[in-house]
Image (tube, helix red, strand yellow):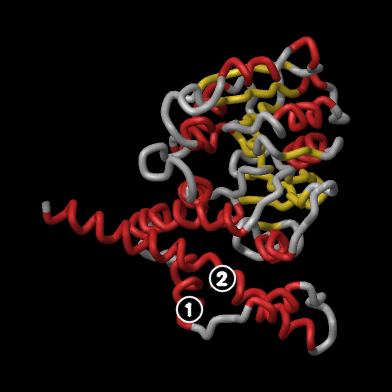
């Protein structure tokens, strides 16, 4: 019986998935302590190609290949953890390269904190081999992840990032797992974290359990992501009226501000934030610029979703 089941939803990542699996092969723990479950999308992905990457003869750990039963990453994660044989479930992305001691760190912390309610958040950084742009650095400050705000070993449910996290399976059972209907993709992490918090969920932050994010990204890609995020955030604030519409609010403010000229933004983004006097001011200019770059895609999608819902209600 494995101690830890690692669930990896995958979607059109033939470039990264084999390397994610290779990184798991290099873990310092006995491979018999872990099983790996890869869940693909049989509708929009090539299941045969995914299967070819998983050749069990090349992996030291138990490896299974599943199909999700519905669209979305929530369905994939649910299929994975429900099939898991271990009492501990870990979620990572299909583009996360875990450092060799990452699984050992997760297991050691759970051994010290065996309570059902305790989960462990690992750190995620951009992969060393990537060309990390100023925009990618900006994403680290609350847009994609917000590890920079964490101090000490405690995190909150709002940091429930399934790129590198582990928890007791019983907690997922208590809340029924991820909400495939309301949050099939985007805000699904926050939703399950929020629902588990009602049951006393406590998230510890182990910065030594490190994963490298092998994903070069761009403003254009994030414009598309923000357009998809807007309707998800509308569903989020409808489900939890006490929570702010965080992206909507920051983008609405950015849209009203005077436009940052491209040359000024380019210069500001390359000034180290820690440079005395100039650095903090430049960081504010770069922050506003990047928000203004993403704001139209998000706000247009927000308004379109509001109009669509309004028509449905009056129909």
Crowding near the residue tagged with mark 1, few <14, some 14–19, many ≥20 C-alpha atoms within 10 Å: few
Contact flag, marks 1 and 2 (Cβ < 8 Å): yes
Query: Going 48% across and 25% down the picture, which residue do you hit?
Result: 68
Q: Position of residue 88 (x, y in %)?
A: 65, 31
Q: Is residue 214 above or below residue 46?
A: below
How far apart are the two marked residues, 1 and 2, measured between alpha carbons?
A: 9 Å
Residue at the extreme left: 315
- In this rendered view, identify the residue nearer to me: 165 or 295: 295
Tell me: 198 left or right of 110.
Answer: left
Residue receiving disc 2: 291
Residue at the extreme top: 57
> For the residue labelled by badge 1, is the local secondary structure a helix, a strand or a loop?
helix
Crowding near the residue tagged with mark 2, few <14, some 14–19, many ≥20 C-alpha atoms within 10 Å: some
Q: Position of residue 43 (x, y in %)?
A: 46, 24
Tell me: 4 left or right of 23.
Answer: left
Q: Earlier in the sequence, mark 1 or mark 2?
A: 1
Q: Position of residue 232 (x, y in %)?
A: 41, 52
Residue receiving disc 1: 253
């Amino acid at each position: 019986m494995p101690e830890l089941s690692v669930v990896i939803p995958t979607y059109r990542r033939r470039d990264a998935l084999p390397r994610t699996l290779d990184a798991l092969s290099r873990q310092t723990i006995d491979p018999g302590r872990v099983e790996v479950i890869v869940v693909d999308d049989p509708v929009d992905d090539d299941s045969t190609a995914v299967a070819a990457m998983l050749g069990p003869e090349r992996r030291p750990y138990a490896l299974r290949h599943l199909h999700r039963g519905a669209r979305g990453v929530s369905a994939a994660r649910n299929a994975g953890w429900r099939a898991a044989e271990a009492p501990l479930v870990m979620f990572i992305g299909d583009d996360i390269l875990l450092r060799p001691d990452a699984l050992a760190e997760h297991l050691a912390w759970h051994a010290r904190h065996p309570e059902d309610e305790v989960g462990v958040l690992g750190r995620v950084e951009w992969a060393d081999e990537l060309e990390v742009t100023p925009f990618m650095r900006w994403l680290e400050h609350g847009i994609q992840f917000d590890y920079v705000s964490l101090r000490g070993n405690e995190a909150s449910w709002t940091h429930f990032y399934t790129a590198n996290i582990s928890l007791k399976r019983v907690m997922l059972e208590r809340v029924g797992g991820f909400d495939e209907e309301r949050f099939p993709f985007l805000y699904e992490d926050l939703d399950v974290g929020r629902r588990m918090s009602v049951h006393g969920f406590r998230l510890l932050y182990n910065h030594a359990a490190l994963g490298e994010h092998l994903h070069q990204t761009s403003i254009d890609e994030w414009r598309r992501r923000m357009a998809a995020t807007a309707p998800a955030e509308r569903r989020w604030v409808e489900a939890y009226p006490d929570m702010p519409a965080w992206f909507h609010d920051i983008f609405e403010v950015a849209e009203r501000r005077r436009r940052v000229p491209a040359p000024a933004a380019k210069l500001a983004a390359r000034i180290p934030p820690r440079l005395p006097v100039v650095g903090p001011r430049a960081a504010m200019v770069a922050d506003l610029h990047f928000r203004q770059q993403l704001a139209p895609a998000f706000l247009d999608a927000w308004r379109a979703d509001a109009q669509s819902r309004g028509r449905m209600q009056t129909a």
